[in-house]
Image (cartoon, coloured by chain):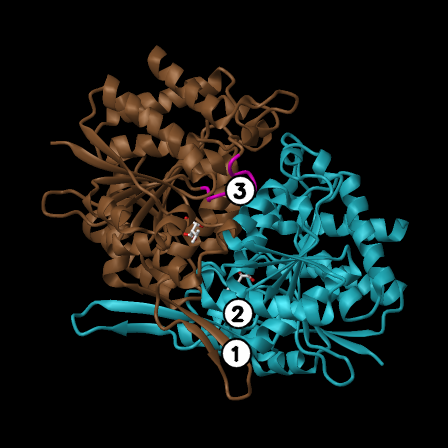
Chain colours: A cyan, B brown
Amino acid sequence: NTMRVAVIGGEGIGPEVTAQASRVLAWFSERRRLPIAVEEADFGLEAYRRTGKVIPPETRAAIAGADAILFGATGGPETAEVPPEARREGSLLKLRRSLDLYANLRPIVTDPALSESAPLKERVLEGVDFVIVRELSSGIYFGEPRGIETRPDGSRRGFNTNSYTTEEIRRVARFAFELARSRRGRLCSVDKANVMEASVLWREEVIALHAEEFPDVELSHMYVDNAAMQIVRAPSQFDVMVTDNIFGDILSDCAAMAAGSLGMLPSASLGPADPQGRRPALYEPVHGSAPDIAGRGIANPLGSILSVAMMLRLSLGRSDDAILLERAVGDALGRGARTADIAEPGRSPVSTAAMGDAVLAALDRL
Amino acid sequence: NTMRVAVIGGEGIGPEVTAQASRVLAWFSERRRLPIAVEEADFGLEAYRRTGKVIPPETRAAIAGADAILFGATGGPETAEVPPEARREGSLLKLRRSLDLYANLRPIVTDPALSESAPLKERVLEGVDFVIVRELSSGIYFGEPRGIETRPDGSRRGFNTNSYTTEEIRRVARFAFELARSRRGRLCSVDKANVMEASVLWREEVIALHAEEFPDVELSHMYVDNAAMQIVRAPSQFDVMVTDNIFGDILSDCAAMAAGSLGMLPSASLGPADPQGRRPALYEPVHGSAPDIAGRGIANPLGSILSVAMMLRLSLGRSDDAILLERAVGDALGRGARTADIAEPGRSPVSTAAMGDAVLAALDRL
Ligand SMILES: CC(C)[C@H](C(=O)O)[C@@H](O)C(=O)O
Ligand SMILES: CC(C)[C@H](C(=O)O)[C@@H](O)C(=O)O
């Protein structure tokens, strides 16, 4: 049974980095006989120019039929010509929500080659290896009521609702507990229970679930402000961290520097499993569309390439291939391949495509 | 006309660090003829044990009559014996809200002595000098509706409201613009306008106010996730940053490491000015009650001492004395005084009181 993979480069640097990740995927398909069928699909500004829709019908069909999606990036100032309604209709947020991708995994792993490489060595501490599990389909991103209202005196009020139900908390917490169990057995739940009722409920449900189903996992709790500091101060203390949508958004960018660059970070977003155990899955680098460097062929494709490793592991059941790919990335870095974001001063960086070449060469070697 | 200063040590390490800040305040009162009257007041667990109230009536009176409050810290697990209602009634949040302390200033400044001192030199980058202006009396901390409801099927939902009005945004933005104008002329406004309507309004009002009253200030905007990363990556890019209540909470802890330790950071929280130009003002270190080290005399008092410098500048109109105190802190650090949180490996740290001594000795010298 062939797995269908939809490849959606999107906007900004999205297509550039995704092109390299696609080459890597093709390598696995050929050399490791991965049973996949790849379908490329349009998304964003170009799609809108061509079809009047940010997500054209063919793309919707490709998404609906896919077992896994490899996504590039979306957004940025260059898209101002797309009217807000069309943009909202075709937003990444809507896509996440419509597939109910509630569990967003963001691993933060430091590569030994980078932790020895100036100017990163002061920032890339050795032995950092943790995963942020971010709740991705609820919270303040989607809560109702929301809006901007004009008041009788002409002034305005903008408001959003942070909302979490028992079920929304438990399913992402369960995912995180299971992940922790498969790793070093430690879960840190991050909230702001000293201020928000949504966090009070979050903490109560995490504690209850721990007692009911995961007493073997070591559970701790941290307030989000302290977590932000601890991620900068001593990131190697963490194994798995679980948190809500907006806190996960902020904390993962806060953690990015520990890996040397936001460009290094992959992610996986998973929805609920169907009776056959299949779950909707979207893989994308944590970075955005970076319009300032788009089209110049200098972006770091490793976030996207490492997202392919997550796909191999989580959607294709190929842990050995995932490990092979992660080793190949380490090998390429170990031999000195550096895009601009992680380059040492005085040494000239390689292009996006050359980094792809370096990973493919490493795959051939390993 | 004498200024009344209420000194409230509070809980945990609060009383220990505040004792040192009080000595410093007394030094200025005597040596620099500061026209102040100090009144000490109880707050928290001890107060509750004695009077059944976290904030006893005398403390309320001291607060109401004060021109400035020097606050230590509150909270922590040791306070479990205080029932939640009493705790809520006497919370720091209620105090901030009742005084309408909407502008919370958190300067992040790196000391040259620390940026040359292992193990901090990798983290304490030279030339960092910015101020986070955090909106402190609105947003998700206080928005209504809020609560936890039980639904017909027995499951629960926790919810909070992030709410900002035109006026709430403009007054804190105006404060930040004015501060930027008195510094290097640059303001970065941080929001999540790609997700929240409250942030869309925030950004619109900041842009409008800029055009109307502060065209000379250089204004930029950043999403909160990117801001968290930039604060870690390159904090010296910032002059003044303005943001909402919860984002300011997270970002200031994220920035703390740039200063070497959370223990180094002071803060000032200001309310609206009355017709005479007086405004309620509360000065406190950014750190909390740190129950794990409370009572051991090892906490860093510099966050509290530097809060006194902010009081000298903002409530007492004594910029020259503020600068003197900041120089004295730099001098004490330059001569090697280090509490445990900022100590070099292999060198024994000084106590809370000895750090106070070092600052007082520096004041005598300068
Ligand atoms: C683009 C934006 C809406 C998005 C988010 O906030 O989720 C991004 O920052 C991310 O982390 O994927
Ligand atoms: C103790 C807590 C409620 C408080 C806050 O979130 O404001 C603290 O973290 C702070 O930053 O002063």
Q: Extreme bottom residue here?
A: B152
Q: Which residue is mark 1?
A: B156
Residue at screen point 59% across, 77% down: A167
Q: For the stretch drawn in magenta, what is the main secondary structure?
A: loop
The spot of residue B333 in percent (x, y) is 47, 21
Q: Secondary structure at mark 1?
A: strand
Q: Which residue is mark 3?
A: B232
Query: What is the quadrant of residue A305 in the picture?
Result: bottom right
Crowding at label 1, few (<14), some or many (≥20) Cα neighbours within 10 Å?
Answer: some
Distance between mark 2 and mark 1 Cα atoms: 8 Å
Q: Which residues are magenta?
A: B287-295
Compare marks 1 and 3 and give the one earlier in the sequence: 1
Q: Which residue is mark 2?
A: A201
Which is nearer the eye, A179 or B101? B101
Residue at screen point 70% across, 53% down: A239
Compared across the picture, whether A271 is left or right of B322 comes to right
The spot of residue B95 in percent (x, y) is 31, 53
The spot of residue B319 in percent (x, y) is 25, 27
Crowding at label 2, few (<14), some or many (≥20) Cα neighbours within 10 Å?
Answer: many
Compared across the picture, whether A330 is left or right of B153 comes to right
Res. B335 visible in picture: yes
Image quadrant occupied by the N terminus of chain B: top left
Distance between mark 1 and mark 3 Cα atoms: 37 Å
Distance between mark 3 and mark 2 Cα atoms: 31 Å
Residue type marked 3: Val
Q: Secondary structure at mark 2?
A: helix
Check if mark 3's residue and mark 2's residue have beta carbons within 8 Å. no
Same chain for mark 3 and mark 2? The answer is: no
Crowding at label 3, few (<14), some or many (≥20) Cα neighbours within 10 Å?
Answer: many
Residue type marked 1: Arg
